[in-house]
Amino acid sequence: MKKLYLECYSGISGDMMVAALLDLGADQKVLRKVLKSLPIQEFDIRISRVKKSGLDVCDFDVLLNAEFENHDHDMAYLHQGKKHSHGHTAHEAHSHSHRGMKEVMEILEKTDMTRRAYEIAVKIFTILGEAEAKAHGTTLEEVHFHEVGAIDSIVDIVAAAVCLDNLDISEVIIPFLYEGGGTIRCQHGILPVPVPAVANIAAAHHLKLHLTGEQGEYVTPTGAAIAAAIRTSEVLPDAFNIEKIGLGAGKREYERPGILRAFLINTPVMPSHVKMDSIWKLESDIDDCSGEVLGYTMECLLDAGAREVHYLPVQMKKNRPAYELCVLCLEEEIPIMEQIIFSNTTTIGIRRCRMERTVLTREIQIVETFYGAARVKICTVLDGENSESVKRCYPEYESIIDLSRKSGKSYQQIYQMIVEEWNKAI
């Protein structure tokens, strides 16, 4: 099972997606066999290499018979409203090739592909159908429209599903879809970019759109539906290895080169006793607060869940001695931490930065001693030349002082006693 990262800086379309997956190594023979089994024969495909901004890029092209040509890549028509050379508009040329969801599902059921590829294709078509139905004020069962029923859209979606299955993709990371602006001419007339279907898909499936301000449609309805159907995460790992890179070519010529870059990635395998995550550091320099205020603020921060709070002496402007407050916390805890700092101190600004960290996994255990129960933190580390796994015991502060008060023994005596009892028990 593999992890895929899609870098959609030039948007995404069906043909770009298929080309990128083919460039990653999806089997062309498997794809051609499936497409040949489609119960529609008014097309052929061409897989080739093209140059985009000087880069060698894979191109997947659905070649339609003349009577079904929709000219979706005709830039003059899309953005200047000109008619095609044969005198028909896209609406006139396409009016007889409309299919609804029922007809599309029948086509998929008759196509020779794996169960997983079939399910991916159905999910993509359903997302696209729901978005178009909403845009046109009808139902999924009743909607008939070019985007779902067009031959090239059917081929693109089936091909994408087959390639994803063939590559055994299990996770797909898509942080953003970059989209243009302005207007575009389609079957229904002149529409704003992003077109309604794309906007509906983004809203329904929480896809993040980044509007570039450039003129043009970078994200097609088919591309958006594929992204929504296959995305499992929008967050890249903090660190990852790149296994392979695939470049898929788009057909439209815009300011950005039409390239969809796809990465097969894996994350470094960490020892079971170690994990990598991130933490946030909040800082503020304070030169006009009393020690009592700073002490109370620290207590409040720790009570609210801060992982660490400390003060460092610093020299500020006008030679004022001051303290730098440092707080370590999780991202979701930032608002409450900042509220505590602003409410209790005189600071008017807080710096923040994200920090990666490596931490030992730990568990809390209870150790029974002669003087009572004590909580201990158990961590596993690699120790010695042979990197053998060794467990270490760290008694909790509160338990140590509690037993010290009960027994009259010193802090160090109780600490050692707890560790010795833990060692006896393992």
Image (spheres, rainbow, N blue to C red):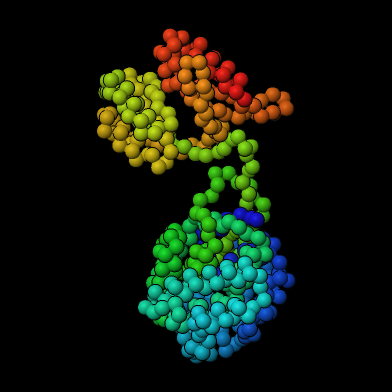
- Residue at 31 percent across and 32 percent down: it is 341
Q: Can residue 185 be seen? A: no
In-image side of 60 versus 190 (left or right): right
- Residue at 48 percent across and 60 percent down: it is 177
Residue placed most toward the observer, 345 or 183: 345
x, y percent for residue 357: 53, 35
Position of 295 relative to 331 (above/below): above
Residue placed most toward the observer, 351 or 123: 123
- Residue at 50 percent across and 85 percent down: it is 98
x, y percent for residue 320: 31, 20
In-image side of 83 versus 21 (left or right): left
Residue placed most toward the observer, 358 or 80: 358
| Numbered label tally | 0
x, y percent for residue 325: 37, 27
Q: In which quarter of the image is residue 133?
A: bottom left
x, y percent for residue 155: 60, 76
Quadrant occupied by the C terminus: top right
Position of 65 relative to 250 (above/below): below
Q: Quadrant of residue 402?
A: top left
Quadrant occupied by the N terminus: bottom right
In-image side of 37 versus 395 (left or right): right
In-image side of 425 versus 368 (left or right): right
Q: Can residue 176 be seen? A: yes
- Residue at 28 percent across and 23 percent down: it is 293
